[in-house]
Amino acid sequence: MLNLLRRYLSQDIAIDLGTASTLIYIKGQGIVLNEPSVVTIETNSKKIVAVGEEAKKMVGRTPGNLTSIRPMREGVIANFDMAERMLRYFIQKIHQKGTLIRPRIIIGVPSQITQVEQRAVKESAELAGAREVYLIEEPVAAAIGAGLPIIEPSGNMIVDIGGGTTDIAVISLGGIVYSESVRIAGDQIDGAIMSHLKREYSLLIGDHMAERIKIEIGSAYPLPEKKQMAVKGRDVVSGIPRTIFIDDTEIREALQDCIATIVEAVRLALEHTPPELAGDIIDRGIVLTGGGSLLQGLDDRLREETALPIVTVDDPLTSVVLGVGKTLEELSLLRQVSTHSSLYS
């Protein structure tokens, strides 16, 4: 009787547990949380001081007694304890019911996640209060969220560029026909910018500044108009803060290796696509999603490299969690897309 009551009262939730951000979708309500995947703790006591948006503001600014931690790295859990505590905090924040209420949770994960990494994600969710945990590959979830007809016997190609990984998948009949995953995405692009400025200007910058540069003047293809911005950091030699000016051409060159890796992964996926499905991709094009797809000119670069239509979804930051959420609303869809996957249970 108690189990029946729990099932009746609990709110099933879908989670996009991302390297950069965690998004949560509640069945019947939509997206209810979108916060950075960051936790700030007291260094000695390990007591949580802040989680999410407040914790991100502290990154690079904490005194010696505080430490900011990103539990997710390259799309998977890097710090099990912090991931569990972060998930618990987010679930309690949006799930304002008693402690007896344990939700069913479906989580989006990278397509080439290992069994050990799968187990870590599931155990973190269970410790955070889940009654049942299901996993679904992020490219499949992103395709569902983008409205692609993935259940049909036709080819759909999606490129999901997140914070830690780029997942590329060809999907047909609800399953992944071929997938490719590279651990080059938003974080590595930020890192390439930081390394370039340190190497060329002996200037140290933080994550926030690198992200700003990426958003404002970062690009994968020449821009219609030249862009320039001031960058503030600390001189490696003198230790004194200083400001330099950089333009989009310089940053584009700094990102060449990252972009080339993503392009090569897309090419590899196309080479391994069955001929019948390749024809569908020629007609429908390649669908870009994930926060990394917002890099200026990336669609133009891929269009030039592949000679195929490139479509960026309307809201690439939410397509994964919307797709996972749709499987909550239609559990039959979860069973369909899980037919060829070991991630269902």
Image: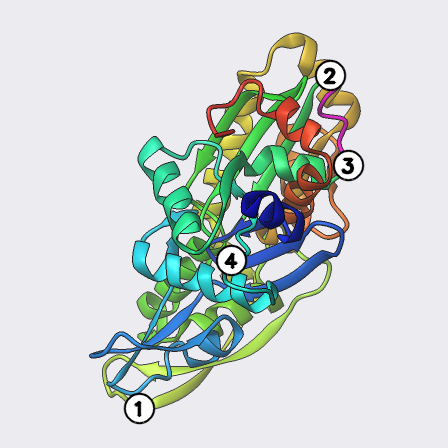
- N-terminal of the two: label 3 or label 4? 4
Q: Position of 282 compared to 51: left or right?
A: right
In this view, 182 is above or below 248: above
Residue underneath mark 3: 147
Is 3 placed left or right of 126 in the picture?
A: right
Relative to 79, does residue 114 appear above or below in the rendering?
above
- Dot 1 surroundings within 10 Å: few (below 14), some, or many (20 or more)? few
Q: Nearer the viewer, residue 27 or 33?
A: 27
Q: Earlier in the sequence, mark 1 or mark 3?
A: 3
Name the mark nearer the viewer: 3 or 4.
4
Secondary-structure class at tag 2: loop
User: Magenta residues: mostly which secondary structure?
Assistant: loop
- Quickly name the residue at label 1: 240
Give the alpha-carbon distance from disc 3 to disc 2, as whole Å.
14 Å
Magenta segment boundaries in residue numbering: 147-152
Question: For mark 4, what is the residue?
Answer: 100
Neighbourhood count class around disc 3 (C-alpha, 10 Å): few under 14, some 14–19, many 20 upward: few
Residue drawn at (43%, 67%) of the image: 38
The amino acid at mark 4 is: Leu
Q: Residue 29: x, y in percent? A: 75, 56
* Mark 4 or 2, nearer chain start: 4
Q: Amino acid at mark 2?
A: Ser
Tell me, yes or no, whether the two marked residues, 1 and 2, touch with CB atoms within 8 Å: no
